[in-house]
Image: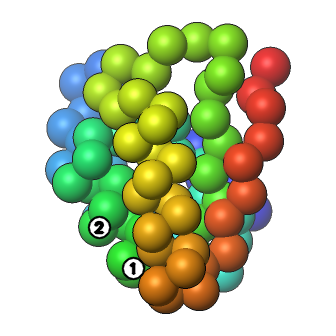
Amino acid sequence: MRFIVSHIRGVPQQLMVPVLLNQVEDDAFIVHDLNRRLLTDAILKKRLYFSVRLKLKLVMINQLILLQLIIRHVIRDNFLCSLERVK
């Protein structure tokens, strides 16, 4: 099962992350436009797959910051993360 998390109009992001994380065990989890604090919270709670929209400019978090977060947590906490292109 895959959960795609992106900005959904009318749904506060701080509600989306905990609700979705409660539903996910070891499933792939794709994060697109979450802000840094929420992204870090998500990384710390679950093993996540990250998909960066390389053709689109991310609104709330740039790709460099995303990569730094992923690398830091992968090295420190041994999370499984995968970068892939999204068409």
Residue, disc 2? 41
Q: How is the image coloured?
A: rainbow
Query: Does residue 49 lie above or below 53 as drawn?
Result: below
Q: CA distance from mark 2 to mark 1?
A: 6 Å
Tell which of 15 and 47 is nearer to you: 47
In percent of width and height, residue 86 lies at: 76, 28
Q: Amino acid at mark 1?
A: Lys
In percent of width and height, residue 36 lies at: 27, 47
> How many marks can you see?
2
Tell which of 3 and 51 is nearer to you: 51
Q: Which image quadrant for residue 33? A: top left
Tell which of 29 and 63 is nearer to you: 63
Quadrant for the N terminus in the image? bottom right
12 relative position to 17: left or right: left
As helix, strand or loop, the secondary structure at mark 2 comes to: helix
Q: Residues within 10 Å of mark 1 (few under 14, many from 20)?
A: few
Q: Residues within 10 Å of mark 2 (few under 14, many from 20)?
A: few
Residue 45 is marked as 1
Residue 11 is marked as none
Q: Residue at x 49, y 13 (%)?
A: 57
Query: Does residue 56 lie above or below 40 as drawn?
Result: above
As helix, strand or loop, the secondary structure at mark 1 comes to: helix
Q: Residue at x 39, y 42 (%)?
A: 65
Res. 17 in view: no
Q: Residue at x 32, y 62 (%)?
A: 40
